Image (cartoon, rainbow, N blue to C red):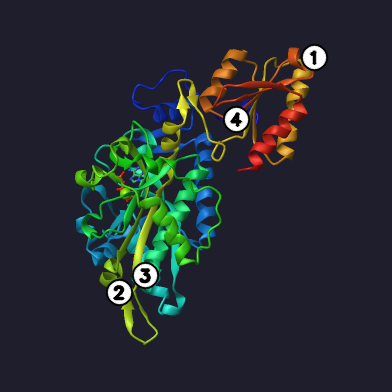
């Protein structure tokens, strides 16, 4: 993309309403524009990152055999009356009535809707296990929407639902989700720690929240500092293997790590003192096994091998897709702007022409641009007639991991400058070597 032809409405001033870095930078970089409290329009740069996050989520769900669907955002209240949640959900639910006076709502979550699909089409244990998921907009009328996309009212969530014959099978599905979530967050450049969460009204021990440590996080968390050393990395997992998935759960959840809701001071004090850590965290996902709660109330049963009708065991598993933009920026920025991890960056590399209109500089930039496109990368070429300082400030703000600076003086010596946004370090390379290096870096992502 050439910046002169793009739509990236960068703001010079820091918007007064933004209290935290991610919100400030998303507004300043022209990624989002508020449409009402807690509701946002996604502008091109923001949409690009949102789509990258979605793509990672889809790819990791596919590896585990989970199947994408797309459910409606507007739902009928009657379904929610069946589960008993129409009244229980309270003021967070956006209630609508249609022209016939029928009660509708904008979905805050989809357990009822997916259970309705399941019961209409699945009758036999032979069709299990089954996990359906979607990435779809949700609406929760949060009492205090704030921090931009972090706590919105309309937000994008990946929500997945497993249907299994037995509790054991459902717990295997739970473990599969844990594995896919660990991998997804790491690909986004995040360390998200699974922490034991509160089962809430549904109860039960089988729920973990994934938290990204950040000063601006809304949850207080307590953990054994050893959990921060764990990484999932590039391991290959056989998702059909109960043992392999269970082993990952054990590895990542056996040390103490809890949010304030489930924190147990006595257990915490059993950790050697130098490893006891307290911090704040951003919840970027949650997995949940809840047994037959919805299948019993809504009649989602299958016939088992003995021809008996039994309710299926279910769980639901969410990732805060739009909140993740905020979480990633909170954990990766400096006072100049965003520092995108390579896995989610809106453009792979920025090209800055120091002297637009200079024949040699223009030609070298065009060549770089074409070479990156040919290599399958997505460059952003700042071809505006602006002074260098302004171009650098924009590149720093939008946070592309790599920048190539091209100017007449360097070109005389046959070099351009390749700069890392993260370390600020630059090296002079021939254009060919700079291209090769950037291509190689992204080959790993
Ligand atoms: P919270 O405790 O932050 O209100 P939750 O536990 O109610 O979230 P879940 O039902 O677990 O949310 O939803 C799955 C994921 O969706 C959460 O882990 C979070 O990342 C994201 N999410 C929930 N509420 C919001 C919101 N208001 N804005 C943006 N993302 C949200
Ligand atoms: Mg949650």
Pointer 3 residue = 168
Which of the 4 image quadrants contains residue 37?
A: top left
Dot placed on the residue nearer the N-terminal end, 2 or 1: 2
As measured in the structure, the alpha-carbon distance from the residue carrying label 4 to the one carrying label 2 is 52 Å
Dot placed on the residue nearer the N-terminal end, 4 or 1: 4
Q: In front: mark 4 or mark 2?
A: 2
Residue 6 numbered mark, or none: 4
Pointer 1 residue = 412
Which of the 4 image quadrants contains residue 163?
A: bottom left
- The foreground one among 81 and 50 is 50
> Is 425 displayed left or right of 88 in the figure?
right
> Is 390 displayed left or right of 143 in the figure?
right
As measured in the structure, the alpha-carbon distance from the residue carrying label 3 to the one carrying label 1 is 68 Å
Mark 2 and ligand 1: say if the CB distance to the nearest ligand atom is below 8 Å.
no
Residue 136 numbered mark, or none: none
Q: Judge whether residue 359 can be spotted in this image.
A: no
As measured in the structure, the alpha-carbon distance from the residue carrying label 4 to the one carrying label 3 is 52 Å
**Callout 4 touching callout 2 (CB < 8 Å):** no
Q: Judge whether residue 157 can be spotted in this image.
A: yes
Find the residue positioned furthest to the front.
272
Residue 299 numbered mark, or none: 2
Q: Which structural element holds mark 1?
A: helix
As measured in the structure, the alpha-carbon distance from the residue carrying label 4 to the one carrying label 1 is 30 Å
Q: Which structural element holds mark 3?
A: helix
- Residue at the image point whose x is 52% and y is 54% from the top: 60
**Callout 4 touching callout 3 (CB < 8 Å):** no
As measured in the structure, the alpha-carbon distance from the residue carrying label 2 to the one carrying label 1 is 76 Å
- Residue 121, given in percent of the width and then of the height, sits at 42, 74
């Amino acid at each position: 993309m050439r910046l002169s032809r793009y739509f990236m409405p960068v703001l010079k001033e820091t918007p007064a309403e933004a209290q935290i870095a991610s919100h400030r930078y998303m507004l300043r970089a022209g990624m989002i524009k508020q449409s009402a409290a807690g509701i946002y329009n996604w502008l091109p740069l923001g949409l690009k990152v949102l789509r990258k996050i979605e793509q990672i989520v889809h790819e990791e769900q596919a590896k585990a055999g989970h199947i994408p669907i797309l459910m409606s955002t507007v739902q009928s209240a009657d379904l929610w009356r069946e589960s008993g949640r129409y009244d229980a959900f309270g003021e967070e639910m956006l209630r609508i009535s249609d022209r016939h006076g029928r009660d509708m709502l904008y979905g805050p979550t989809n357990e009822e809707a997916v259970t309705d699909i399941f019961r209409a089409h699945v009758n036999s244990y032979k069709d299990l296990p089954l996990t359906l998921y979607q990435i779809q907009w949700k609406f929760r009328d949060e009492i205090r929407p704030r921090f931009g996309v972090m706590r919105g009212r309309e937000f994008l969530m990946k929500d997945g639902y497993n249907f299994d014959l037995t509790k054991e099978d459902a717990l295997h599905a739970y473990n599969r989700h844990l594995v896919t979530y660990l991998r997804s967050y790491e690909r986004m450049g995040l360390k998200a720690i699974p922490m034991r969460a509160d089962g809430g009204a549904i109860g039960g021990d089988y729920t973990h929240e994934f938290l990204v440590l950040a000063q601006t996080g809304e949850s207080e968390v307590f953990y054994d500092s050893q959990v921060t050393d764990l990484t999932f990395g590039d391991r290959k997992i056989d998702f059909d293997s109960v043992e392999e998935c269970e082993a990952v759960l054990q590895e990542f959840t056996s040390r103490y790590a809890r949010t304030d809701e489930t924190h147990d001071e006595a257990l915490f004090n059993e950790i050697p003192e130098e490893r006891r850590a307290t911090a704040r965290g951003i919840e970027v996902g949650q997995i949940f096994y809840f047994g037959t709660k919805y299948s019993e109330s809504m009649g989602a049963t299958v016939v088992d091998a003995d021809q008996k009708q039994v309710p299926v065991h279910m769980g639901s598993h969410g990732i805060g897709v739009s909140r993740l933009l905020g979480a990633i920026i909170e954990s990766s920025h400096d006072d100049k702007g965003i520092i995108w991890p390579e896995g989610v960056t809106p453009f792979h590399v920025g090209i800055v022409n120091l002297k637009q209109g200079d024949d040699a500089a223009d030609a070298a930039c065009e060549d770089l641009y074409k070479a990156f496109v040919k290599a399958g990368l997505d460059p952003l070429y700042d071809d505006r007639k602006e002074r260098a300082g302004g171009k650098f400030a924009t590149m720093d703000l939008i946070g592309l991991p790599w920048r190539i600076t091209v100017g007449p003086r360097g070109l005389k010596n046959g070099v351009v400058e390749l700069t890392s946004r993260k370390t600020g370090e630059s090296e002079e390379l021939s254009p060919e070597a700079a291209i090769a290096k950037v291509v190689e870096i992204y080959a790993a992502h």
